[in-house]
Image (cartoon, helix red, strand yellow):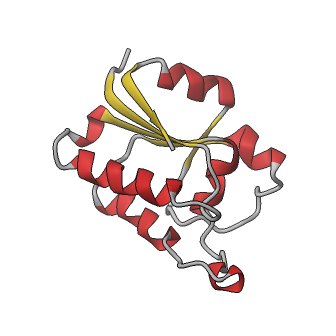
């Protein structure tokens, strides 16, 4: 069974607060101190909205920080999972994602992965 040192769980939508941007900053900072395979990244509930590629935040007078989530792949953080149940509940099955090949897993499988982490940071 794989063990992770840190898990970053994104549950909040990208706009309305700075929590997802702060979570991404923390994730990228942690990647400087941990091996890539020791970090788990998970998107659950409204957190899946952070990965939509064609969002238009300028329409609600927000800065576009979503493109920064592309750094997950640039930093070779491959342990990144998206809750397929959350995607279906929000009718997002047919949208374009920021990540080139997101790994969709069930909510139950996602929780099982989170249990393998020493620390879980929720944003």
31 vs 20, left or right, is left
Query: Relative to 36, is 53 above or below?
Result: below
Locate residue 41, reporting x and y percent: 44, 42
Locate residue 56, reporting x and y percent: 67, 80
Asked whether 54 or 93 is in front, the reply is 54
Asked whether 4 or 104 is in front, the reply is 4
Residue at point 77%, 58% (across, down): 92
Residue at point 81%, 52% (across, down): 90
Give the quadrant of residue 79.
Answer: top left
Asked whether 102 or 116 is in front, the reply is 116
Residue at point 48%, 18% (across, down): 115
111 vs 26, left or right, is right
Can residue 123 be seen from the camera position used here? Answer: yes
Give the quadrant of residue 54.
Answer: bottom right
Query: Relative to 57, is 97 above or below?
Result: above
Locate residue 96, reporting x and y percent: 65, 68
Number of dots carrying numbers: 0
Check the picture and name the quadrant holding the N terminus.
top left
Q: Looking at this view, name the residue that lies furthest to the front.
A: 17
66 vs 45, left or right, is left
Locate residue 93, reporting x and y percent: 76, 56
Query: Relative to 66, is 112 above or below?
Result: above
Residue at point 67%, 30% (across, down): 107
Can residue 101 be seen from the camera position used here? Answer: no
Q: Looking at this view, name the residue that lies furthest to the top.
A: 1
């Amino acid at each position: 069974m794989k063990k992770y040192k840190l898990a970053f769980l994104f549950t909040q939508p990208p706009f309305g607060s700075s929590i997802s941007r702060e979570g991404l900053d923390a994730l990228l900072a942690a990647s400087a101190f941990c091996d890539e395979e020791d970090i788990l990244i998970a998107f659950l509930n409204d957190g899946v909205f952070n990965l939509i590629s064609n969002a238009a935040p300028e329409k609600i007078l927000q800065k576009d920080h979503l493109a920064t989530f592309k750094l997950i792949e640039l930093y070779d953080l491959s342990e990144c999972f998206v809750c397929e149940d959350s995607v279906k509940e929000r009718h997002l099955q047919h949208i374009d994602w920021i990540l080139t090949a997101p790994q969709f897993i069930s909510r139950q499988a996602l929780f099982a992965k989170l249990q393998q982490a020493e620390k879980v940071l929720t944003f």
